[in-house]
Amino acid sequence: MTNGIGGSTAEQELAAITPWADIAPAITAQERMARLEKARRLMGEQGVDALLIGAGASLNYFVGLPWGASERLVALLLPRKGRPIVVAPHFERGTLEADLSIDADLRLWEEDESPSELVVQALREIGGSRLAIDPAMALLFVERIRRAGPTLGVIEGSAIVDGCRMYKSPAELALLQQAKSMTLEVHRRAAKILRPGIRASAVARFLDEAHRAIGAPRGNGFVIVQFGRATAFPHGLPGDGILAEGDIVLIDVGCTVQGYHSDITRTYVFGDATEEQRHIWNLEKEAQAAAFAAAEPGRPCEDVDHAARSLLEKAGLGPDYRLPGLPHRTGHGIGLSIHEPAYLVRGDRTPLATGMCFSNEPMIVMPDKFGVRLEDHFYMTDTGPKWFTAPSPSIDRPFG
């Protein structure tokens, strides 16, 4: 094979990888404090006295705790005025103090105590009666807090949380850029190890090892490797595909850098593309370009989806979500979560603004034949969108 597809081995490509040199700086404590102050301003607009953030991406965003949610309540209670409060299990004190990147009041609970009561007691101390809650918090915790404080006014806090997280700072953009640049290099090397008979699992394993070698200590954040007919399903089919000459190859993979995600898809042919494969690939590239061109500051997110979908409909695909055509939204926000608001989809009228980051992936599905997804990401500036990674040039030279 030529043009960057095949001709090498996993061992050769892994040996050639050097750790990423252009390391983006970590988020500072000062930036996290600015995030908390912005949240407080938004809380004032919403008329709430405090914001409760549970373990997960948003807790990481605000206070630097990279903990996942579990059956135990770990949360930040942010009053509109006063010191932030972190509620967590007592036995986690050491880890909590090591991970926490801001100064906060620690309210620790033993296993036989109610963390919900701790939250409500802290609210009483600050004189709070209206509480906004992280939209990602489990209903179990929300209901326990309602029972512990039956007179509380509880609202869903997405206007505050998303109002902060949707707009990335220069430091966040640098971390996202590193993750995406690393993944594109891993993609390029993965294409070179392809050969007839290779299994999807072997490619996925290489992608994980390559991500670790280049500087992503957790390897793949996720991975989809599909060959042939399996590419006609946006997230693939069960089983371990085997590559054959003439197959469409679709690889969708990402990693994280200090919690910030990459998520890049490349589609190409192992061998010579048929006329139909080439035609659909070119339409996909045109749709991706149309979406990018429509991403003008101030326009609603849904306009980007409309631009891609309209181009495909004019080419005889669709309409709407019908197949053959584009079965899902054109793109999603990305940051500390791989999918996060806002979304490039009909009905999302969020105005495009500086700092927003999106995937651009108007996938075309040809039912029971193949699918083509080209996925790159862009970020909004005052003057328009900018690519994190350059789109794939052609079906014959997917990496230039």
Image: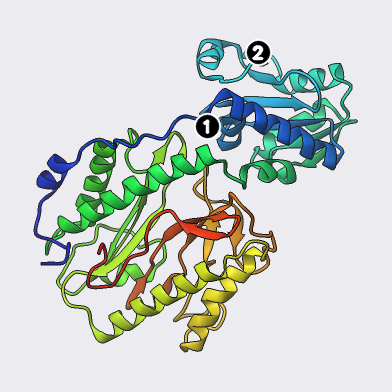
Amino acid residing under circle 1: Gly
Q: Residue at x 38, y 66 (%)?
A: 374
Horizontal placement of 332 versus 394: left or right?
right
Label drawn at residue 108: 2
Q: Is residue 74 above or below residue 7?
A: above
Q: Quadrant of residue 82?
A: top right
Q: Residue at x 26, y 86 (%)?
A: 275
Return the x and y of residue 37 as percentages of the image width and height.
Answer: 72, 31
In terms of depth relative to the viewer, which is nearer, 29 or 216?
Answer: 29
Q: Is residue 62 above or below residue 287?
A: above
Horizontal placement of 257 versus 337: left or right?
left
Q: Residue at x 85, y 16 (%)?
A: 125
Q: Residue at x 81, y 30 (%)?
A: 147
Circle 1 SS class: loop
Return the x and y of residue 43 as percentages of the image width and height.
Answer: 80, 37
Residue 142 appears in the picture as rendered: no
In terms of depth relative to the viewer, which is nearer, 253 or 394?
Answer: 394
- Do the residues under discs 2 and 1 have CB atoms within 8 angstroms? no
Horizontal placement of 259 versus 63: left or right?
left
**Of label 2 and label 1, which has the lower sequence position?**
1
The quadrant of the rendering that contains the N terminus is bottom left
Return the x and y of residue 77 as percentages of the image width and height.
Answer: 72, 25
Specify few, some or many for label 1: CA neighbours under 10 Å numbering under 14, 14-19, or 20 or more: few
Return the x and y of residue 343 as percentages of the image width and height.
Answer: 59, 59
Residue placed under numbered mark 1 in the picture: 68
Horizontal placement of 230 versus 86: left or right?
left
Circle 2 SS class: strand
Colouring style? rainbow
In terms of depth relative to the viewer, which is nearer, 382 or 313?
Answer: 382
Residue 75 appears in the picture as rendered: yes
Alpha carbon separation for disc pair 2 and 1: 18 Å
